Amino acid sequence: MKKIILFAIIFTFSLNLFAQTEEIKSPLDGRNYGVVYDIPATKNVTVKTDVPYAGNLTIDVYSPPNAKPNDRFPAVIFLNAIGDAPNQMKVKKWGIYSSFPRLVAAHGMIGISMDMDGGRIQENLKGLFDFLEKDGVKYGIDSTRLGVYAASANVTQGSIYLLGENVSKNIKAAVLYYGGVPNSAFRRDLPVLFVIAEGDMVRNGQQYATLWQKVSESRAPWTVMFASRMPHAFDAFADNDESRRIIQQTIAFWKSNLEPVPQPSWKPSFAREIVASSYDADSQKTADLLSKWIAQNPKDVVAYQQYGRVLSQLRRFDEANTAYEKALEYGGTDAGIYLGLAQMRFGQKRYEEAAANFAKAIEGGARNSQVYGQLAFTQMFLNRNEEAIKSYEKAFEAGIPPGANTRGIAYYNMACAYVRLKQTDKAFEMLNKAVDEGFANRNTLETDEDMKPIREDSRFQQLLTRLPKNTTSN
C-alpha cells in the first residue's frame, strides 16, 4: 500500500510539473534553474538552435567561443531519455539543459541538448548518434570523440542505450548523475563517472550499496563518486562550492577522456613494461617477458630474482631454483632472493634448507612479521621448538596483524611448541590468547596430536567451553 501511495505522489508531482506552460515561470519550478557553476567564457559561447536530427526532432549546438569554421571539437550530448510532453516546455529549454551545454562549450568542447519522442527513445537515441557521425562535422563536431550526460530518470533509458549492442562506438565517456544503477552488464571499454547524491540514499541506498561489487566483478572503468550532503539534482539546486567542485571534476572527466593525452618525450620502455606486469596478477605473462629480457641481458641479477619469484608462483620449481641460483651466481645479495628460495624450499618440504634461507633473508633485512612467522613455522616442522617460540616472539614484536588467522594462529602454534617442551602453563596461556584473538577451531584442539598431552588437564575442558560447538574451521 505504501508503494502505491508513493507512486501516486510522484505521478501527481509529475503532472503538476508538466501542467505548467512555458510562459508560467514560478521561482519554485525547478526547470528554471541552470547549472550552479559559471565562468566568464560562457557569455561568448555561440548557439545554433533547432538543428533537425530525426524528422521533426532537433538539437541545440553550443560551440566554444571564437570557434573557426575548420575547427573540430569533441562533443558532450545531454541526453533527453524521458521524452518531451506535447505542447509543454521541451527538456532542452530547461535551465540545466540550456546552461550546462553552454558551460561545456566554454571549456572548449561542444555541448548538445536534444528533443526526444518519448515513445521512440531507443530509436531516436540511435538516430541522434547516427546523425552526429554523418553530419556532425558541419557543426564543428569531431564525431569520433563523444561524451554523454544522463541525469535522474534519464539514466534508465540512457543506460539501456549506452550498454546495449547498438550503441555508438564513438562515445568515449559517460557521466551518470543521481540515477538508478543500470541493470545491464557494464562495458569494459566505456569510462563512466557515476555520481550518487546523498539525498537519493533513501530511495536507492540498497542498489548503491552493491554498485562497487558490480563494478569490480565486471572490471569496468567506472569512477563512483559519493556527493556527500548533496540533494537530488544538486548541479541545478545546490548553490554552493561543494556542488561546484563536483561539476569541475565532471568537466575534467570529459576532457580527460575526450581530448588527446599529451604524449611523453621518452620512448616506450620494455623494462617498464616488465615492471608493470610484475605488479599485475598475470604470472605467466610476466614470466614470458622476463624470459625475453634475460635472453637480452643474461647477467641481470634483479631479472633472475623476479624470474624465480614468478616461476615459483607458476609452481615451476626446478626452473625457479635455477633462476635464484643464477641471481646468487652473478652477485645478488638481496634478501628477496633468499626469501624466495626459502618459500620454495618450504613448499618442497625441504625444511632445513628453508629455515637456513629464511634466516639469511632476515639477516639481509626482511624483518617483517610474516617472514619471522614463516621461519617459526618452519622451525616447528623441524621440532626446534625453543627457536620457533623465539621467532614467533620476534614476529609479534614486528607487528602481526590482529585476527584469528594471524595472531590467533601464531599463539596456537606457540602453544604447540610449549606443549612439546612440557611447559603446560605457558601452553594454556598461549591457547587462551589464541581464543582471545578469535581462534575457534574446536576440531583442531580436539584432534591435534600436539594437544594430546594436555587434554586431560581441567584447563583444557575449561578452554573448550569458550569455543562454539562443532566449529571445524576459523
Image (cartoon, rainbow, N blue to C red):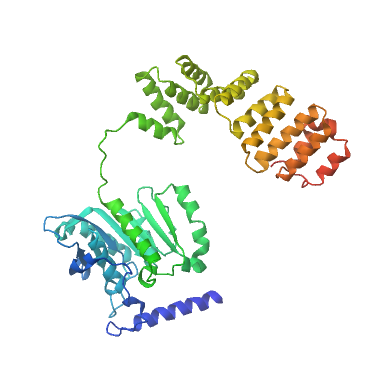
Residue at image point 36% right, 55% down: 164
Q: Residue furthest top?
A: 329
Residue 378: percent from left, percent from top? 66, 25
Q: Nearer the viewer, residue 405 or 292?
A: 405
Quadrant location of the C terminus in the rendered image: top right
How many marks the image carries: the answer is 0
Quadrant location of the N terminus in the rendered image: bottom right
Side (left or right) of 317 relative to 91: right
Task: Classify residue 450 by image quadrant.
Answer: top right
Task: Classify residue 151 by image quadrant.
Answer: bottom left
Residue at image point 75% right, 29% down: 417
Residue 32, relative to residue 403: is it above or below? below
Q: Is residue 50 visible?
A: no
Residue 9, relative to residue 208: is it above or below? below
Q: Is residue 454 visible?
A: yes
Residue 436: percent from left, percent from top? 73, 45
Residue 299, relative to residue 423: is it above or below? above
Residue 44: percent from left, percent from top? 18, 67
Residue 80, relative to residue 396: is it above or below? below
Residue 336: percent from left, percent from top? 52, 26
Side (left or right) of 393 relative to 83: right
Side (left or right) of 423 relative to 411: right
Task: Classify residue 101 by image quadrant.
Answer: bottom left
